[in-house]
Amino acid sequence: MEQSQAKALLNATEGARTRTRSVLSANWFPMILFGVLALVSVPVAEFWSWTAVGALWLVGAPLGTLATALWYRSRATEIGLSANPWPYVITAVAIVVGCTATGMAGRGGAVSYAGPLLVIGLGYLVFGRLDRSLLVAAFGAAMAIVAIIVFVLKPQHVYTLTMLPFGAGSALLGLWNLRQARRID
Amino acid sequence: MPETELHPTAELDETVHQRVRLGILAILSEADRATFTYLREALDVTDGNLSAHVGVLAKAGLVRIDKGFVDNRPRTWVRATAKGRSTFQAEISALSKLVGRYRGDIAGSRRA
């Protein structure tokens, strides 16, 4: 076998793998959905009540996770390509359970706002690893660092200070991913 | 006595070592499963051609074929088996060795 043939075969194979990874890395739907949910929760926290924020997340997070699962399923059927869903399902369930547990365990203290943000940050790190997306992983790491900073500093209006960057960042990353996905399609 | 090193071509798998079949396994190494239609369009081959190559891989136990229906229309999904994934990795490693060996030969002849 000639070197040029082996090289061409290797290049074609790597090209097919890269294209497949690009098609599978579409994550704009959950990124925008949870980003918007976080942004909506900010005025609720500032101008309404903590009970309303708790209710918003307790209803919104499981519904959002279910909507995300249905979106991935319908997209896989439409394009004819699907990733292994289990690592994503396990990570999403861990985020919902982790946020609820730390939010309730904190009893309104530092853990109740820094804990969920830390769990979300770590979850996004895992999603970034699964999608091989450096942007999503870096965003997750940034959110985890913000969680540690607010835990230490305990600033005023901490919910707004954490949810605004998380919501805006997630929505913007989702819009960026949507633009990339449209280019590929 | 030094151990005789096999030439990398000896490590190439006859079943996998073909452009379309390697392409099918390349796609399935990244995805959980792909439809027949996706594979046909991604690899730019005809139905008959793809069908023959998927058949060869299935017969060797490297892929599994699942048939089903979506909106009353038949849909064929193809997924790599564990054997298919390991065979693909071995093939890529053998091809990489082969390219590396040629590079070494060229560098050696240039030095001489």
Image (cartoon, rainbow, N blue to C red):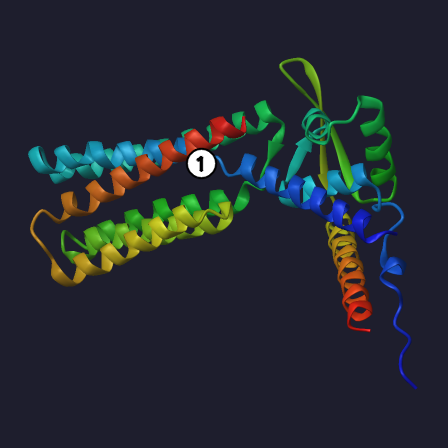
Query: Residue at 40% of width from left, 31% of height from top?
Result: A29
Query: In the picture, residue A63 is in which quadrant?
Result: top left
Question: Which residue corresponds to mark 1?
Answer: A27
Query: In the picture, residue B44 is in which quadrant?
Result: top right
Q: Secondary structure at mark 1?
A: loop
Residue A47 as seen in the image, left or right of residue A121: left
Q: Where's the N terminus of chain B, which quadrant?
A: bottom right
Query: In the picture, residue A48 is in which quadrant?
Result: top left
Residue A134 as seen in the image, left or right of residue B40: left
The crowd level at tag 1 (other Cα within 10 Å; few <14, some 14-19, many 20+) is: many
Query: Residue at 87% of width from left, 37% of height from top?
Result: B56
Using the image, determine if residue A48 lies above or below residue B99: above
Residue at the far bottom: name it: B1
Chain letter of disc 1 in the image: A
User: Type of residue at label 1?
Assistant: Asn
Measured as percent of width and height from the top left, residue B87 is found at 78, 52
